[in-house]
Amino acid sequence: MEKRWKNLLVVSAVLIAAAFFLYYYFSYLKTGIVGNYVALLSLMEKYGVDASKFSHVVAGVSKLSDSQLENLSNELKDFSNRADEAWLKEIALIYADIADLQRNKNGLESLQFKAEDVLTNPCDKLAIFSEMKTKGDNIESIASDLFKRSSKFVAEYPDKAEELGVFVIPNPTDLAEIRKAHKMQSSVIEALKVMCK
């Protein structure tokens, strides 16, 4: 066989080997990326939450019990620590914030129900009011973090935000209302503490 044909065969073999390598390498990468997203969907599905669209997550999380919300939040934070892609890390933390916010809202509503007859012996309910303030502090803090995190996600990952239907949560008006309600609640509770000394 002539030398030029030998060289051509060697070059062809090298090119074919390189093509196979690149094909399998990128196939593996693609499978890993899809696999991570599927793992997040499966994690949410375990709690009965459809994570294919952002609005479904918000609606689904609102139906969970406090223990489910706590477990989901912990699992999402752990998932975020293990995820390779930045957008997956962020969306997992956004979902965790939504779960934490819902759990604190549930807790505050429960405490408000216990404190309904506040006008009769308010000083007897001081411990409940202190718990309400703690829950209110948590809600304001988580809502602020969630607003920043979801705003950042929409700005940094517009394609993913559009694909998943991610929106800024809470919206600026709702966040202002949360802060206003928390400030008013804190003022009332502080006044009661002074009155009940």
Image (spheres, rainbow, N blue to C red):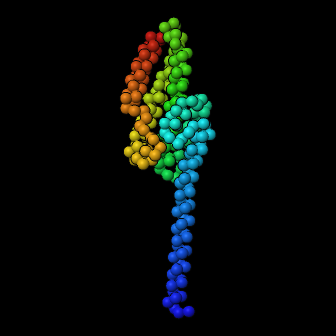
Residue 63 placement, left or right of 174: right
Q: Residue furthest top?
A: 120
Q: Is residue 33 above or below residue 97?
A: below
Residue 151 seen in the figure = yes
Classify residue 67 by image quadrant: top right
Location of residue 165 (image quadrant): top left
Given residues 31 and 196, the one toward you in this image is 31
**Total marks in image:** 0
Q: From the image, which quarter does the N terminus lie in?
A: bottom right
- Provide residue 161's location: percent of width, then percent of height: 43, 44
Foreground: 83 or 43? 43
Residue 39 spot, x, y in % from top left: 58, 47
Q: Residue at x 41, y 22 (%)?
A: 181
Image coordinates of residue 64 in percent, x first then y, are 58, 31
- Which of these two is toward me, 50 or 107? 50
For the point 46% across and 33% down, which residue is it? 142
Evaluate whether residue 145 shows in this view. no
Q: Is residue 193 above or below residue 182?
A: above
Query: Which residue lies at the image location 51% right of the left edge and 18% below the top edge?
Result: 112
Task: Name the residue: 60% across, 40% down.
Answer: 45
Residue nearer the viewer, 125 or 9: 9
Question: How far across and down, in percent of the image, does residue 191 sit?
Answer: 42, 14
